[in-house]
Amino acid sequence: MAIHKESSEIVATAMALRSEVYPSGGELGWLAGDPAHAGKGLGMAVSAAVTARFIEAGCRPIHLYTEDYRLPALKTYLKLGYMPFLCTPEVPERWRAICVQLQWPFTPR
């Protein structure tokens, strides 16, 4: 979590969870930030800290869940190297639309 020095308040947090899907994996979950501190890279910082912790612990794969409309969070995850799981025929088109909104290259794998 990120704590504001002057007020000692938590201003951003993310959780490192054991994956219920992958036995040796990890799940980045519950990313949240105080809107009063938006735009300072705190979501990136706490998400990167969770991701680094999983890598250090040897967790593979590392995954997360989120909704299509959470565009700032999606851009953060893409910047960290997370890739969308294109699991059904309609998902690539959903991701293409998201990438257009984020001005992010769509490169399905």
Image: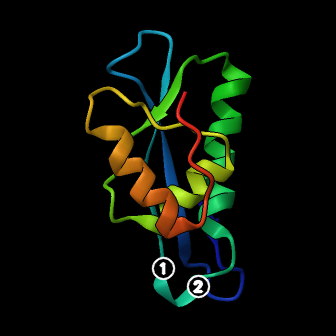
Determine the residue positioned at 54% across, 19% down: 61
Which residue is tagged 1?
Answer: 34
Can you give x and y, in whole percent of width and height, for residue 58 in the image?
A: 67, 16
Q: Is residue 40 left or right of residue 83?
A: right
Determine the residue positioned at 62% across, 52% down: 105
Look at the picture and state if 8 lies above or below 104.
Answer: below
Which residue is tagged 2?
Answer: 37
Which residue is nearer to you in this view: 78 or 3? Answer: 78
- Which image quarter is the N terminus in? bottom right
Is the residue marked by circle 2 packed among few (<14), some (14-19), or many (20+) residues within 10 Å?
A: few
Is the residue marked by circle 1 packed among few (<14), some (14-19), or many (20+) residues within 10 Å?
A: few
Can you give x and y, in whole percent of width and height, for residue 46 in the image?
A: 62, 56
Look at the picture and state if 6 lies above or below 27.
Answer: below
Secondary structure type for disc 1: loop
Q: Is residue 67 left or right of residue 15?
A: left
Look at the picture and state if 15 lies above or below 17.
Answer: below
Tell me if I can see residue 65 in this picture: no
- Which image quarter is the C terminus in? top right
Determine the residue positioned at 67% across, 46% down: 80
